[in-house]
Amino acid sequence: MEMEDGMDTAKLYGVITALMTPFDESGEVDEQALRQIIEFQIERGIHGFFPLGTMGLGPALTFEQRQRVAEVIMDQVRGRVPVLMQVGTADTPSSVKLAKHARSIGVPAIASVAPYYYSHSEYEVKEHFKAIADAGECDFYVYNNPRLSGFDVTPPIMARLAKEIPNLKGVKAAFDSLKQHLSYLHAMPPDFVVLAGFHEYLLPTVPLGVAGSVSPSSNFFPELTVELWNAIVAKDYETAFALQHRVNVSSAPIWAFMMERRKWAVLEEFWKARGFNVRMYPNFKSEPLTPAEREEIVDAFRVARVPALQLQAELV
């Protein structure tokens, strides 16, 4: 089955939300809020979910919490959109257990970050990925996040991995490098899926072969990012250019707060602006925003032309 533009719908593509994990005041996963957020996303047309990565706070959860989050997501999604579950940890045995658990609950595709904290050789990273891919027995994606993992799975390394991991289907990149994204396309077979770690460059990269993107932005502006995707697929580039500008400007505060000011609390504020009673995010103490900084969030919604304080629909 294919879209009108020839893209194989069996592959992950389009706007994939880097799904965030909400918590209650005690730091436990807020399952009700998580289910509501999933419905909010699906109703607005997103094409898939990437849970338990950086935004999902996978590395900051207990093993049992990660399993439970995966179970809640699969139960709520019910096969309506693909789920690319991030199962990577700092050690191979834990990652393998999470991969087997993902298989047991019907996850269609898994991803893993390189083992972090310790410095690893290419051989060690390869063996780590091989063990996880074998355990998952489903489509496997490399989650390349060199800034946080300490290891960059470059296009040449990816090409070598593909020779030993037959179910390696693609990469979820987490860096701001158009050159490296396009280098994956040149180094890998035509059916290799490249998912960018941003929405800010969809317009210039999708026509060149990038299959879609995974970003925090669509947590809060799913309808805007889906509208951008649809314009690109339709080759309505004039509309897409205007939408790309709105995506970039409205998303700017997210990156500025997180990368420059180290205020993860901005994400909770964005959620509340969309009407969700998220009681804690992240699950560690984050510096609160000032009134002036909250006004930046209001401005972001004005630019996005997306209503704030919109109540989520009832669960189906």
Image: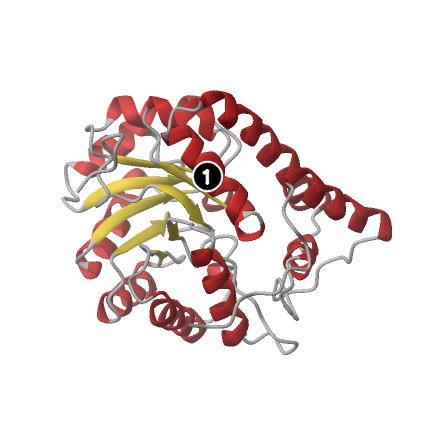
Residue depicted at x 43% and y 36%: 229
Q: Residue furthest right?
A: 291
Locate the C terminus by quadrant: bottom left
Q: Nearer the viewer, residue 40 or 236?
A: 236
Kind of residue sitting beneath label 1: Gly
Horizontal side of 314 relative to 296 (left or right) equals left
Q: Nearer the viewer, residue 313 or 108?
A: 313
- Colour convention: secondary structure
Kind of element beneath mark 1 = loop
Residue 67, position in %: x, y?
Answer: 37, 71
Residue 38, position in %: x, y?
Answer: 46, 63
Residue depicted at x 22% and y 60%: 136
Question: Where on the picture, by quarter, is residue 153?
Answer: top left
Q: Is residue 283 above or below residue 188?
A: below
Horizontal side of 232 relative to 300 (left or right) equals left
Locate the N terminus by quadrant: top left
Name the residue that disc number 1 marks. Answer: 197
Q: Is residue 157 above or below residue 238?
A: below
Does residue 198 appear in the picture of this structure?
Answer: no
Residue 225, position in %: x, y?
Answer: 50, 41
Residue depicted at x 66% and y 71%: 279
Residue 310, position in %: x, y?
Answer: 64, 60
Q: Residue furthest bottom?
A: 26
Does residue 221 appear in the picture of this structure?
Answer: yes
Number of numbered discs: 1
Q: For label 1, count other residues whose C-alpha is less than 10 Å away and answer few (under 14), some (14-19) or many (20+).
A: many
